[in-house]
Amino acid sequence: MGYRIGVILGDGIGPEIVREARKALDAVCAKYGHHFEYEELLLGGASIDVHGVPLTEETVAAAKGCDAVLMGSIGGDAKTSPWYQLPPERRPEAGLLGIRKALNLFANLRPAYLYDELRAACPLRDDISAAGFDMLIMRELTGGLYFGARKTEEVDGVCVATDTLSYSETEIRRIAKRAFDIAMKRRKKVCSVDKANVLDSSRLWRQVVEEVAKDYPEVALSHMYVDNCAMQLVMNPAQFDVILTENMFGDILSDEASMVTGSIGMLSSASLNETKFGLYEPSHGSAPDIAGQDKANPIATILSAAMLLRYSLDLDEEANALEAAVRQILKEGYRTGDIMSEGCTQVGTREMGDLIAARIME
Ligand code: NAD
């Protein structure tokens, strides 16, 4: 089949890690007889250098014409890069927020998976990490507290700041539907996280999630309060499959979940809208400290490409093959510097990409 893939190389290590992810996608194409047409799009610092702004109408229009977009991280060193002399709305990060908004990417997915070979990096107790974990946090990205009305005012001579946490049933339904659809591709479990013992928005959240669940009889739904979830993530992470939650809770829990894996260079992510379209990128930043040195771990970006295959193109078998190739390479003992341990073979960005592409082809 033929697909059109937008490619944002990004800044810092972005071009190096995206290059390796494309290698993996090309190997998938060669093995399974697909054809990907790539279109390079500018965003962030790279766009500022050419157009003076971090996001242009052309990039948005071109992204809309693609089946999915694969992206390296954007941004530079805030202390030394001239991009950070610009006003905030013209800095690289504004481009990222802008494209998420322009493409209506309301669902953010961050998997947290513990590879047996990387267990030593997991900060949890051995008896907990021994059980492994494989979860996916589905965070609502465009509503809730971060987007509600806010003000700071003086009331009776005292300064008062107010933020508003508001969700409509439409916003909750569309993210819940996404979570259940994705659970159907996984172990068919959804844990919806809220604070329904206190917040009205959480009570509505719970009610709508239960309504949506009726359309997915094969998926087991549970509810958990957010404070309990924060504890369970470090006490018993193996219990989770898909965690569905609102914007702020998801912001905090997804960082907690990813950090218990212990390996920043391994963490993929996706942001989806109501169609099949998605923007796929590593969870880490552009690592300007190691850019251009063949030191970056390309695996987070390669795993983001696997998510692209699964969630935007419905190529599940191909996504599984790519993930299996990553596992195989780790099993064979190959490591980039960030995940290196004794007895393993250290390789650079390019070689890691070559090895994974070769295993896909086997
Ligand atoms: P960072 O994630 O880029 O780097 C933190 C540390 O992790 C650094 O030591 C870096 O070398 C290392 N690291 C990160 N990714 C790695 C990889 N794949 N392989 C090996 N080591 C890796 O975070 P930061 O330094 O705080 O941010 C740098 C820039 O990235 C900033 O401009 C920031 O705004 C931007 N950023 C962008 C995104 C995004 O594009 N979504 C996300 C986070 C940060």
Image (cartoon, helix red, strand yellow):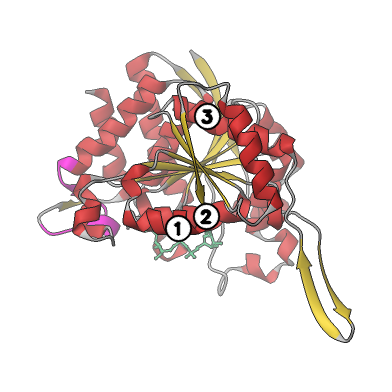
Within 8 Å: ligand 1 and the Cβ of disc 2?
Answer: no
Q: Where is mark 1, residue-wise?
A: 230
Identify the secondary structure beneath mark 3.
helix
Return the x and y of residue 192 as percentages of the image width and height: 53, 42
Q: Nearer the viewer, mark 3 or mark 2?
A: 2
Which amino acid, mark 2?
A: Val
Return the x and y of residue 307 as percentages of the image width and height: 45, 33
Q: CA distance from mark 3 to mark 2?
A: 19 Å
Is residue 4 toward the left or the right of residue 354 in the image?
Answer: right
| Front one among 269 and 14 | 269
Q: Which mark is residue 9?
A: none
| Front one among 357 and 118 | 118
Identify the secondary structure beneath mark 2.
helix
Q: Report which quarter residue 351 is drawn in.
A: top left
Identify the secondary structure beneath mark 1.
helix
Q: Residue at x 55, y 51 (%)?
A: 250
Q: Where is mark 2, residue-wise?
A: 226
Query: Mark 1 and mark 3 in contact (Cβ < 8 Å)?
Result: no
* Residue range corresponding to the magenta coloring: 331-342
Query: For residue 338: magenta?
Result: yes
- Density class for disc 1 (Cα within 10 Å; few <14, some 14-19, many ≥20) is some
Q: Which mark is residue 180?
A: 3
- Density class for disc 3 (Cα within 10 Å; few <14, some 14-19, many ≥20) is many
Query: Mark 2 and mark 1 in contact (Cβ < 8 Å)?
Result: yes
Return the x and y of residue 15 as percentages of the image width and height: 47, 47
Residue 91, compared with residue 310, is above or below; it is below
